[in-house]
Image (cartoon, helix red, strand yellow):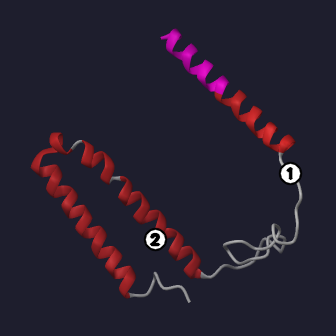
């Protein structure tokens, strides 16, 4: 047991060491030339140096939540596909039901206009 914990500690220390080394090297060797284009607003459309209490539109949160939900649901497909031979018919039809409910949810979000971005 102590050998396994020692191996884990070595891997953890190696990961921390490499992370610090690579971060420090990128900071020391990287070009630090900020200009107006780099400091401009990127994807969210808000200026990065404004007040932190700016209000976001509800659609931004809705699209983010829908992305997380559908992304996590798709994540369930890989272990199911790998273990399809072991789960049998009950597991197969359970996943088909799951995908059907997911499709209904996606169709509903599409019909009510949640995926539209004006």
Q: Which residues are magenta?
A: 1-14
Closer to the observer: label 1 or label 2?
A: 1
Give coordinates of residue 23: x percent, y percent.
76, 40
The residue positioned 88% from the left and 67% from the top of the image is: 35
Could you give the CA–CA distance between mark 1 and mark 2, rounded to whole angstroms? 37 Å
Residue 66: numbered disc? 2
User: In terms of image quadrants, where is residue 73?
Assistant: bottom left
Give coordinates of residue 118: x percent, y percent.
56, 89
Which residue, given by chain and number where applicable, does mark 1 sit on? 31
User: In terms of image quadrants, where is residue 20?
Assistant: top right
Give coordinates of residue 49: x percent, y percent.
84, 70
Q: Are marks 1 and 2 in contact (CB under 8 Å)?
A: no
The residue positioned 47% from the left and 67% from the top of the image is: 67
Q: Secondary structure at mark 2?
A: helix
Q: Is residue 8 magenta?
A: yes
Instruction: Please report whichever mark, 1 or 2, sits nearer to the chain's N-terminal start.
Output: 1
Q: Secondary structure at mark 1?
A: loop
Left or right side of 75 for 85: left
């Amino acid at each position: 047991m102590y050998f396994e914990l020692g191996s884990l500690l070595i891997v953890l220390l190696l990961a921390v060491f490499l992370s610090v080394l690579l971060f420090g090297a990128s900071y020391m060797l990287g070009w630090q030339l900020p200009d107006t284009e780099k400091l401009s607003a990127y994807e969210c459309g808000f200026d990065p140096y404004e007040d932190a209490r700016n209000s976001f539109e509800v659609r931004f949160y809705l699209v983010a939540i829908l992305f997380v939900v559908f992304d996590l649901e798709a994540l369930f497909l890989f272990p199911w596909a790998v273990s399809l031979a072991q789960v049998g018919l009950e597991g197969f039809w359970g996943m088909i039901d799951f995908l059907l409910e997911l499709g209904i949810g996606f169709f509903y979000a599409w019909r009510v206009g949640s995926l539209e971005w004006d």
